[in-house]
Amino acid sequence: MSARSTSRRLAAFGLALVVAAAAAAFAQSPPQVTAAQVRFPLAVGLPAPVAAASISRTGQPGPGAYYYWIVSNYAIGSTAPAGPFLAPGAPATLSASSYFTIGWNDP
């Protein structure tokens, strides 16, 4: 048997031992796994209606008044109407130069 042939056989045998040892170690102790659990509570019912609103007038005041109700729409449904919110000093007709701006925070 030649020296080169013996060298190849020893290398193959050594590689087989390394692979067998790694397989045995893996079979004895499985790899460590880190896991986490995340919980998302389901919403029970709809959010509360809007609690307050701010109304500001742009343009000249008038003798009238408007009342506004606000309904928040969500993917699971709509809230009950909030209001009425009074807009005093309203002109007889609303227009591009005489209007109300309404602001609120969603619940």
Image (cartoon, helix red, strand yellow):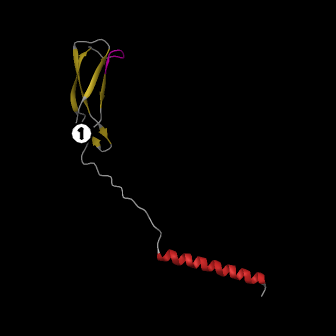
| In the foreground, 45 or 25 | 25
Q: Residue 4: where, in percent of width, then height?
A: 77, 81
Question: Going 31% across and 41% down the picture, which residue do you hit?
Answer: 74
Residue 89 position by quadrant: top left
Label 1: which secondary element: loop
Total labels drawn: 1
Q: Which residue is mark 1?
A: 48
x then y, percent, for residue 84: 20, 27
Residue at 41% across, 61% down: 35
Task: Locate residue 29 relative to residue 101 in the image: left or right.
Answer: right
Asked whether residue 12 is drawn in magenta, I would say no
Left or right relative to 16: residue 94: left
Q: Residue furthest right?
A: 2
Say which amino acid is labelled 1: Ala
Image coordinates for residue 30, horizontal then vertical, percent: 47, 72
Which residues fall within the magenta stretch?
Answer: 95-100
Q: Residue at x 54, y 76 (%)?
A: 23
**The N terminus sits in image quarter:** bottom right
